[in-house]
Image (cartoon, rainbow, N blue to C red):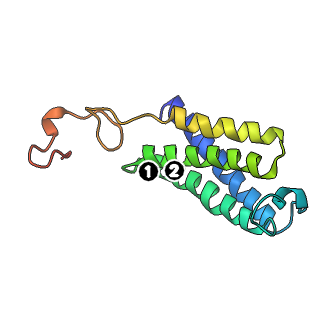
Amino acid sequence: MDRQTKTLLGLLLFNGVTAVAGGLALMTDWIPEQASWVRNTDFPSNYFPGVILMAVVGGSSLIAATALVKRSDGWQLASIVAGVVMVFWIVGEVASIRGFHFLQVIYLATGALVVLWTPGRHPGRGPSGDRVNPARRNAETGGWQ
């Protein structure tokens, strides 16, 4: 695994683990509930935002990290989706709570970096991103042998 891929994996794990922890903290009231956080939303408490943070934001990053480690086909898409989910979560959070915390800048940056640092699939590369011999390409299906 090259340096950029290790950094990407680190970002995905950081986003995933901290989003799961933050979601659990909101759901269990480990972070004291503040009425101002849900005042301008449709949520009566921090519980459901915690579920979304844990399952959607954290889950997408952890799934992408797992796919990257396994070099599963489509890991790049999973990584980009996880980064976009993080960016949208932070933008939505700032807009809904109408407040600001320095951690929002950090998570906005890590989400954007995940998107920017996820390599695209290139012609001449197989599903794992490795270079393949074009002579091994299956002529009938267009797939890799």
Q: Mark 2 points at which residue?
A: 64
What percent of the width, then of the height, locates residue 110? 65, 38
Name the side, left or right, on which 6 lies relative to 19. Answer: left
115 relative to 88, above or below: above
**Near-viewer residue (24 or 67):** 24
Q: In this view, does 48 lie to the left or right of 12?
A: right
Amino acid type assigned to the residue bearing label 1 in the image: Lys
Q: Which amino acid does label 2 sit on?
A: Ala
Q: Is residue 36 shown to the viewer in this render?
A: yes
Residue 59 is situated, as x and y percent measured from the top left of the image, at 59, 58
Q: Label 1, label 2: how many angstroms apart (C-alpha)?
A: 10 Å
Q: In this view, does 116 lie above or below 103?
A: above
Displayed quadrant of residue 23: bottom right
- Which residue does the image show at 84% across and 56% down from the upper left? 37
Q: Left of 136 or right of it: where is 95?
A: right
Q: How many labels does the image show?
A: 2
* Residue 50 falls in image quadrant: bottom right
Residue at figure coordinates x 63%, y 43% from the top left: 87
- In the image as oriented, which residue stretches furthest toward the left? 140
Q: Residues within 10 Å of mark 1 (few under 14, many from 20)?
A: few
Residue with the mark numbered 1: 70
Residue at (75%, 36%) from the top-left corner? 105
Q: Which of marks 1 and 2 is in front?
A: 2
Q: Earlier in the sequence, mark 1 or mark 2?
A: 2
Q: Can residue 34 be seen in this view?
A: no
The answer to whether the residue labelled 1 contacts the one labelled 2, judged by CB atoms less than 8 Å apart, is no
Q: What element carries label 1?
A: helix
Which quarter of the figure has residue 9?
Answer: top right
**Image coordinates for residue 18, horizontal then vertical, percent:** 72, 51
